[in-house]
Every structure is written in structure tokens, then in C-alpha cells.
């Protein structure tokens, strides 16, 4: 099974940005954690981060052409703004899980809107970086069905 983990705007700033909200782990720590988990559950994983909306669209499309079986996506702020990301997820039809480190439903009202939520099979919010691993486990279970 091949999973692509896609992170959007400002997630490269983990550990530096608002640690009281996003924690003290760096982006490199997150990538290490994802890679170690992938090894444990025997899935192939590729991790991608960009601050640019179009690059995220390109990476979603690329996942289709690469034959990816699942997507874990945290678009950062593009969650709340991007019809293009929603359309890309709908276009490729790859089972996807929306992840947010913080509990977006308990923050500002504008964070309660997600353009991708009803395209995704599941959402994990407010579980910190552990949420990425839960999303991978879910996708693996779906894949086995
Ligand atoms: C990350 C961001 O960058 C925010 O724009 C989202 C999300 C929340 C997170 O919790 O991972 O609103």
C-alpha cells in the first residue's frame, strides 16, 4: 500500500509557530514519526509539504498518476479557503483523511469551515501529530477491506 501525506501552508514551521497550539515537535520530527509508523505498519509513505496552493493541487494529481492508495492531508489554512484542493481530491478519487493538529472546531469560526471535509473519508482533529498516524491506520484498514 502506498500513502501520500500532504501538508500545506506553514506546517514546515511546526515547533516554531504558536507552540501552545501546534506543539513543540518540529516538521522534521513529524516526518520521522510518520516514516517510523509507515515502517511499523508496512506501508510505503511519501511526505510532501508546500506553502503554495497550486503545488498542493499538483501533488494530489501526481498521487493519482503514481498509483497512490491513500492520502493524508492537512492543507493548513487552505482547508478553509480552497475549492481547488477540494476539486483535486474529488478528481483523483483516492481515499483521503483530513488531519488537523489543533481542534479547529474549537477555535475561530473561520476554522470551522472546511472545503475538503465532505470529500474525505474521515477527519482527525485535535490529536496533535498523532492524528497523522491514526489517519494512516484508518487508510490501511480501508485498503484491506
Ligand atoms: C493548521 C493550520 O495551519 C491552520 O491554518 C488550520 C491546522 C489548522 C492544524 O491544526 O493542523 O486552521
Image (cartoon, grey):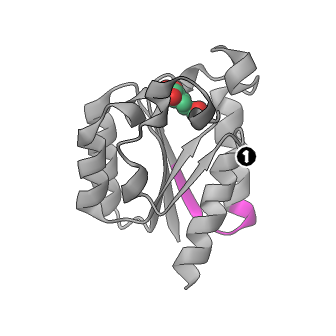
Q: Residue at x 41, y 64 (%)?
A: 68
Which residue shows up at 47% across the image and 63% down it? 121
Q: Residue 106 appears in which quarter of the rendering?
A: top right
Q: Which quadrant of the render holds ligand 1?
A: top right
> Circle 1 is placed at which residue position?
130
**Magenta residues, as a range?**
39-46
x and y, in percent, of residue 24 in the image: 76, 22
Q: Is residue 70 above or below residue 101?
A: below
65 or 17: nearer the viewer:
17
Identify whether 44 is placed above or below 36.
below
> Which of the 4 image quarters holds residue 56?
top left
- Residue 108 percent across, percent down from the top left: 53, 23
* Residue at x-position 25% and y-position 40%: 83
Whether label 1 lies within 8 Å of ligand 1 gets the answer no
Residue 40 rendering spot, x and y as whole percentages:
75, 64
**Which image quadrant: the C terminus?**
bottom right
- Judge from the rendering whether residue 59 lies leftward or rightward of residue 97; answer left or right: left
Task: Assign a secondary structure to mark 1.
Answer: helix
Residue located farthest toward the front when viewing the structure as drawn: 109
* Spot occupied by residue 46 in the image (x, y as percentages of width and height): 51, 51
Let me know if residue 135 is in the magenta part: no
Vertical placement of residue 12 versus 64, above or below: above
Q: Is residue 123 above or below residue 18?
A: below
Identify the image quadrant of residue 50. top left
Amino acid at each position: 500500500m502506498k500513502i501520500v501525506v500532504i501538508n500545506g501552508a506553514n506546517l514546515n514551521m511546526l515547533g516554531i509557530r504558536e507552540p501552545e497550539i501546534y506543539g513543540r515537535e518540529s516538521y522534521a520530527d513529524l516526518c520521522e514519526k510518520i516514516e517510523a509508523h509507515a515502517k511499523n505498519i508496512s506501508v510505503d509513505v511519501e511526505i510532501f509539504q508546500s506553502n503554495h496552493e497550486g503545488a498542493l493541487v499538483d501533488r494530489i494529481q501526481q498521487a493519482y498518476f503514481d498509483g497512490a492508495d491513500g492520502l493524508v492531508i492537512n492543507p493548513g489554512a487552505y482547508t478553509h479557503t480552497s475549492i481547488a484542493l477540494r476539486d483535486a481530491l474529488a478528481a483523483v478519487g483516492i481515499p483521503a483523511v483530513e488531519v488537523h493538529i489543533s481542534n479547529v472546531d474549537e477555535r475561530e469560526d473561520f476554522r470551522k469551515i472546511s472545503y475538503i471535509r465532505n470529500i474525505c473519508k474521515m477527519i482527525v482533529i485535535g490529536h496533535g501529530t498523532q492524528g497523522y498516524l491514526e489517519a494512516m491506520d484508518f487508510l490501511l484498514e480501508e485498503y484491506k477491506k
